[in-house]
Amino acid sequence: MKKIELIGLDGIGEVHRGDSVGQLICDACERQQLALADGDVLVVAQKIISKAEGRMVALATVEPSARARELARELDKEAELIEVILGESRQVIRTGGRAMIVETHHGFICANAGVDQSNVGLKQVALLPKDADRSAREIRGEILRRTGKQVGVIVSDSFGRAWRVGTVDVAVGVAGMAPIKDERGLKDRHGYELKAAVAAVADELASAAELVMGKRDGVPVVVIRGYDIQIKEEGSVRELLRPAAEDLFR
């Protein structure tokens, strides 16, 4: 019987600009007496990476544009927050209620461009990393230097879903593993040829890890052990993005 473990890392503490997230993870593993192994997957909450990379904005320093003020009145949000969201957006896809659905500069379609006000202090917001694939590669490289172990790394964030209530964590950055398992062309147990069997495994692992992370539990890193990842040095979150030409709902 296949067994998958989810192990939360405690004691990482508050992260500050300039910190090495890879070093913080290795130190936490040592304190927890957890020896990383080849094939482990580390799911790292985007928030601590954004803090380490200085991707934080004090809303008091933001001067809203006329467009931001107009949208703020329409959506009942702070104009300064709207200005930050616009700055992180390639285009606004839709607005309604109190929501802004945008395409970020990374190519993600999500609410508020991933700009987050939770767990960062009042009147502060966290932005997504500029390149979370690169962030994941740096974490993976530091772990390899410190431990000699080849691990997969997923940077995760909470996204809403167009057809269902609630958020789930998804991958916004990937390193060292294939983010997709494509089984098209293989046969199932009854001999049927699979035609749509493309699993977003990086998103599935990120979502599983969030069960351990929680929103208020102070567990920003989870080690997933026992899942057989496909090692892929050049793995990237871009593989998970649906091309606009194939998006029936955009």
Image: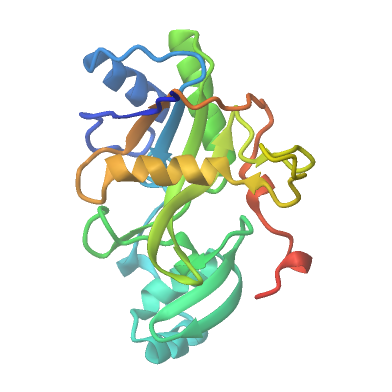
Comparing 220 with 199, the one in front is: 199
Determine if residue 32 is in view.
yes
Give the mark count.
0
In x, y percent, where is residue 56?
A: 38, 53
In x, y percent, where is residue 30?
A: 28, 13
Q: Compared to 30, does 74 lie above or below?
A: below
Comparing 203 with 149, the one in front is: 203
Comparing 144 with 179, the one in front is: 179
Residue plotted at (55% across, 71% down) = 102
Q: Compared to 217, does 153 lie above or below?
A: above
Quadrant where the C terminus sits is bottom right
In x, y percent, where is residue 50?
A: 41, 45
Residue plotted at (60% across, 30% down) = 177
Residue plotted at (41% across, 55% down) = 168
In x, y percent, where is residue 175?
A: 58, 32
Q: Say which quarter of the image contains residue 76.
A: bottom left
